[in-house]
Image: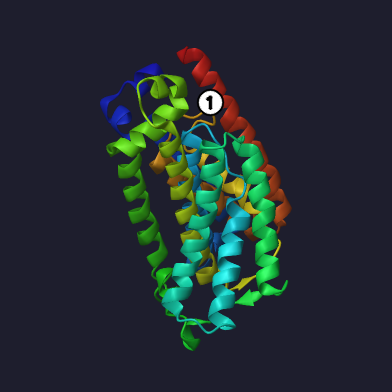
Amino acid sequence: MEKIKQNPIVKKIGFNRIVLICVLILMYLLFCLSTGGKFAGLPRILSALNYAYFLGFLSLGVTFVIATGGIDFSIGPVMFCSALISGYCLTSLKVPMVLALLISILVGLCFGIFNGYLVAYWSVPPFIVSMASMNIAKGVASVFTKTQSVSWPQAADGGWFRKLVKIGNFPMGLIILIVAAIICACLLNKTKAGRYILCLGSNREAVRLSGVNTKKWEMLAYVICGILVGIAAIFFVGAYTTVQPGYGDQYNNEAIAGCVMGGTSMAGGLASISGTLIGVLIIALLQEGILALGFTKDYQLIITGVIVIVAVYADVVARRRKN
């Protein structure tokens, strides 16, 4: 095994990424064989991708937060809050489509600023802040929409934003998600902000003693997360149309599972954007495969929970060996 890991090609691509890609391919083949080839059809693939788009943006966002050693369990409800408020402004207040999409991003940004400020400047534990934000997001969305669901317009009714998800059968959303992942990877690995965010997770005290404003960079991670959550809301309504108040919790674990599975350490200091992207595709494929086999979504929740435990345990073991 060590010889394989030391191979120049394997080292360049990353052993963990290669394993994840193999898992993704094997899962796809397994679902195809289990359904008599029906899973190989384009509709199933597009359906899995629809799920991967918004989940991908959620996972990219929370990757920055986890890299600092923090956590955010409010991303799912905040995504729904963004979709509900912006959708209500579009359908009931008759604001222009472009403005409604900007409102979605703005709502996510506001929650990112709120979470980041409390964590970085008030030193409130991230777990407490995110749990509070989760409830606030649900409450704000319910009050704003008067507890009513919101349906975004179809493409035929002026819903041109749906072309961000797909044009015909072309998965436009996949292209946008990959571009977003490249931007996030450059931001995390090639900029001063990204290096400080990672250093916060590795050794916060050493970074602080070196004269770095740790509060500013920690807050930035939550702000980036909030923006990406607002974008995730756009892709959610682009694929699924109707949004109901009080939901979104189920996507927290799936987004975090995609991060951890992809190589982002829950202890902070280590993150992989490309690994997160592959992890999200695995989660999306798993969700679609379970439905194709005739099982309910409850089984996916069980499997996702197991994935999180196994991934975190593997990270703990790897850190012990390294130390």
Q: Secondary structure at mark 1?
A: helix
Instruction: Give the residue drawn at x 49%, y 53%.
Output: 226
> Where residue 297 sits: x, y (%)?
69, 55
| Along the viewing direction, whichever of 47 and 162 lies nearer the viewer | 162
Of 218 and 308, nearer the camera is: 218
The residue at the point 43 percent across, 35 percent down is 271
Residue position marked by numbered label 1 in the rendering: 315
Quadrant location of the N terminus?
top left
Relative to residue 78, is residue 45 drawn left or right?
Answer: left
**Image location of residue 10, percent across then percent down:** 32, 29
> Is there any visible trace of residue 52 in the rendered image?
no
Q: Residues within 10 Å of mark 1 (few under 14, many from 20)?
A: some
Q: Quadrant of residue 212?
A: top left
Give coordinates of residue 237: x percent, y percent. Answer: 54, 70
| Mark 1: amino acid | Asp
Q: Is residue 111 above or below residue 241?
A: above
